[in-house]
Structures are given as C-alpha cells and as structure tokens.
Image (cartoon, coloured by chain):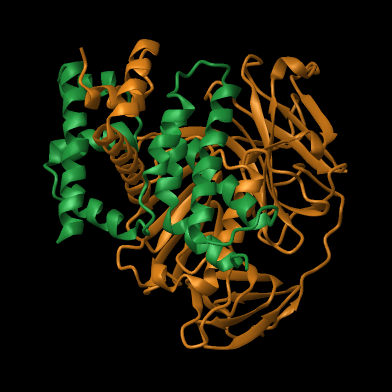
Chain colours: A green, B orange
Amino acid sequence: MSLSQEVVVRTLLAARTRISASAWMVTRDVQAAEDIFQNLSVKALAGGTTFDMEAQLVSWAHITARHEALNWIRDRKGRIVCLDEAVLNLVAQEWEETPEGPRLKALRGCLDGLPRDSRQMLDLRYSEERPCEEIAKTLGLGLDAVYQRLSRLHRALKQCTEQRLAT
Amino acid sequence: MSSPDDLIVRYLEGRATADEVATLNDVLKQDGDARAVFRAASFQALTVADLGRARAPRREEPARWNVRALAAAAAILLVVAGGLIWLLSNPDQELVRVVRQTGAVTLSGSTLTVEGANSGAEVLLTDGSILTLAGDSELAFAGKRGTDITVRRGSVTVEAVAQPTEQPMILRTPTAEAVVMGTCFTISAQTGETMVTVGSGKVRVRRLVDGASAEVAEGQMALATLDAAAPLASRAIPPLVSTWSQAFDAAPPAGWQGEWVAADATGPGRLKNVLDVSYRRKDGTVVPAYVVSVRKPSAITTIRPDSLLGVKWRVRDPGIGAILLISVQHSDGRFAGNFQVDLKAGSFPADANGWRVFAAPVSTLDGRFPEGAKLPTVGRVMLVFMACYSPKGELEVAEVSFP
C-alpha cells in the first residue's frame, strides 16, 4: 500500500533540513537548496512516483535533491566545482533515518550556548552568506584564521549535538 | 596543506580549487569521520540560515520561488493541516515563517512589517494557513498558533485552512474583527474603515464601534467603519469592468499615491512621484523609490492576459528608466503575482514635452513576485505602480488605462 499524501508530507518535513542539505552540499546556495526541496515535494505529491515506506521516500528525496542540484550546477555551465557524485552518494547514504527534530533542537541549544563572536561568525557565513574573506575583514582576522575557526566550530557543534542527544 | 576540516569549509564556501576538491573527494571516500563532519557542517549551515531568516528576513531581492514551488508549499501546508500535530506541539516552532518576500519586509518578533507600495510577503502559519501582505501593511501575531492576528494597517489576503471551532483564526483591525472558519478572503484596514471581501468560504465580521456583526459569504463583501448608524451588511462584490482609465485633470480619488499637478503648458494634469520605501538593506537603512501608484482593496479592474495596459509618463532625465508593475489576484481572491516591465526611456519616443506612451498586452509583463508567475485566465488588478529609483528622474504620470 502506498503512503498517503499526509504521510508523504510529514516524512518530507521531518527530514527537510537533511534533504535540503543534500542539495546544498552541491549548490552551496541556500535559496537554490530550498527551491529544490520544494520542487521535489511537488514531485512526491504529484503521484507520478509511489512510495511504500517512509525510508524509500527519504532515500528517493535525497537522490532527487542531489540530481536536481547537479542540474542546477550544469545550468551554470561548469563554473562551480563539485564533489564526485559517487562521494555525494556515499555521504547521503549515511544520513540517519530518524526524524531530525531532536537533532535540530539539540543543535539550537548548542548554538545558543556559543560565545557571541563564534555565533556572529556562523551568522555572517551562513545566514548572511558572506564569503570568508569578507568575514576576515569584518572581524579583523586573517583568512586562514576564519577557516580554522569555522572548521573548529563545526566539529565542536557536532560533538555538542551528539552529547545532548545522548543525555 | 589544509586539514580535511578546513577543506570542507572551503568547499562549502564554494572557494575550493579543483585540486582541493579532488583532495576532498579522496578524503571523503576513505574517511567516515570526515563524511560525518561534512554532513554535520551542512546541517548546521542550513539551520543557522533558517534561524537567521526567522529572526529577520535577509534577502533584499524578490524571492526566487517559482510557481511550482509555491504550489508545493501550498499543497504541503494544506495537507499538513490535518496531520502535523507534532509540529504544532513543538515549543520551538515559530508562529510565522516568511516564505516569500519582495521589497522591504521585516519580521521582528511576532510583528511583520511591509513597507512600500510594491513590497509584499507571503507567510505561513503553523497550521498551514497562508497570508499574503501586499503593499504597506503591518501584522502582529499572537496565540499558540499565531492565529490571533492584529492587522495594524494595510491589506492581507488570507487562505485559511479549516479552523478549530473552539479557537478559530481571528483578524482584528482598529475598526473590526473577522472570525475565520477556513476560507480565502482579503481584509484591508485603512484609517477609520475595514473592508472584507470573501473569495471562498465564510467570514464573520464584527464592527468594534457597536459590536454589530454580519456573516460575509463567498462572493460578498462588507465594510465596517466607525459610523454605528450605518448598517453593517454583507453585499455582493460589485462586478468589475474590464476597461478602466484614469487621467488627472482633477485631483485623483483616494487610493492614489502621488502629488497632483494641474495642467500647464508642458502637459495635462498629472501625478508627480512621491518618496516611498523600495527595500531595506541588511543594515536596516532604506533604499527609496520615487513612486506613483494606485491600490484598491476591492480591485481596480479585471484583466485577461490579452488585456491592454497603457501608461503616459515622462521623466526629467531621459537617461533614467522607470518600472511599471501591476499586482494581480485570482478571481477567487488568491494572490497571483506582481508583473513588471522595465520602461527604458530610450525605448519609447517622447513628444516635445517629454511625454512617452507605453501600450501593450499585460501578458508582455514579466512575473517577478513570485519569479516566473503566470497571469491568471481572469485576474483582478489590485495595484498599478510606477517608479524610478533616482531623485533626478522626477517621474510624472498623466494617464493609466486598461482600455
């Protein structure tokens, strides 16, 4: 028996950030990733494809997001260098299958606990989508220091999130 | 040599060279920990972007949602209405989310402000209802579901999902309140009066000055003022004519934005541009527009894609272009889109006094909000807007018509 529209919607929304992330890893453009999520939602609801299980739907959504993102890049005629599709596939296969709500909540708690300058750096980079070079100038740092701080922040947030989920 | 974590950040920034991407490919193929960091960083980045948008909409340019995407959002949210109880019970859920915007739109706490005649926003409530604000307007959201809404000013079109009878959506203006049971309608709050027009479903309108109420059904409208002696009655929305014309031999009727100038040796009576908000920069400062416009909550005219639109205008500096925009609703009151054409002065011959004429089917205007919007088979024009973005332009409009 195929999933009802309601279940399709609930399942897609419960994995929205992850599915969008599958597109964003390719496009690195937040708006494009959102557009792709919306488009694949239309496809899922349009009934051209039926899904028997939530996991099947989520898997299809990640693959579709990646393909649409690659098409988005191709439309830009190779100006954007991207990871190999096989690597992207490997990355996507390892997403958790559980609803992302608890992880989001844990991550938000970790973000709230960050020092102000760290949060500012994340906001500048991902909320305002400013390039690291501009962030370096804004914050009076060297470019390498910005890359290092961001990479440490990502790892620290990952650990913090996992700790919160474990407790 | 960059560490794998630094490479991930550079790649996600879009700045990694081809060699660095090749290196990252190799690392991710072999290293499960690096893949986990890569996934985590992507998840974190989108979450930070989402949180930033919830605090204050960040993009200044019109959102790039296409029509299908919009349909998806609508479809999703309508279906969601019945099922996503878990979403509603999530204490972290924002009351409203701006899903599309154009021009100056600010979401501050639970107050949404739209500034500028051609600015607009579409917001989603947690229950899946969709609100479209067009032009200068301000809404405040309260209640557990954000459905206790104060319309401080302006016009909002509501596409409400079925509402719980014990706690329906309520929209309050300074002069009236509308209780919604699941419907599509437009409510416009102006000084001293509130107009409600219902595209589908039913709305109960209560006049605040005396508590009188009326049910407004599909295809009907009601006007609530501060005059308790006037009857508060629901009446049929008057059929709109499909031709419409406005010249400015005399001062224009209410609803027009512009400074009236009487006829003189250089031209007929006209409206001269006035300053309005175009959009806000990220630092909150305003980018002005020089505007002549008209908005009518009950619509200006009906159009079809082959309907003609004519404008007679001039600018002081012929090197400065202008834009012409119309905002259109579907016949049932749903927002259809903003449609725009760029009027480059050099593309239109001027007479001796500098007057130029644009006349073309409305189908030649581009859908700009949402991007790629299509004109409905039959639409209702709610706004006609002309603007230039330089004070040197001194835009003047002598006639607007849908002949």
- Give the answer, above or below, for where B158 lies relative to B82: above
Q: Is residue B371 found left or right of A144 in the rendered image?
A: right
Residue ranking furthest to the left: A115
- Asked whether residue B130 appears in the rendered view, the answer is no
- Give the answer, above or below, for where B111 lies relative to B274: below
Q: Quadrant of the N terminus of chain B?
A: top left
Residue B281, image quadrant: top left
Name the residue located 74 percent from the left edge and 64 percent from the top edge: B332
Q: How many numbered discs, if any?
A: 0
- Asked whether residue B91 appears in the rendered view, the answer is yes
* Front position in the image: B356 or B37: B37
Q: Quadrant of the C terminus of chain B?
A: top right
Q: Position of residue B22 (x, y in %)?
A: 37, 16
Q: Is residue B31 found left or right of B268 in the rendered image?
A: left
* Front position in the image: A97 or B269: A97
* Front position in the image: B31 or B136: B31
Q: Is residue B159 found left or right of A87 in the rendered image?
A: right
Q: Is residue B342 found left or right of A121 in the rendered image?
A: right
Residue B27, image quadrant: top left
Name the residue located 63 percent from the left edge and 29 percent from the top edge: B395
Name the residue located 34 percent from the left edge and 21 percent from the top edge: B26
Residue ranking furthest to the front: B30
Name the residue located 35 percent from the left edge and 27 percent from the top edge: B29
Q: Position of residue B203 (x, y in %)?
A: 62, 79
Residue B62, image quadrant: top right
Q: Position of residue B284 (x, y in %)?
A: 34, 38
Q: Position of residue B166 (x, y in %)?
A: 47, 88
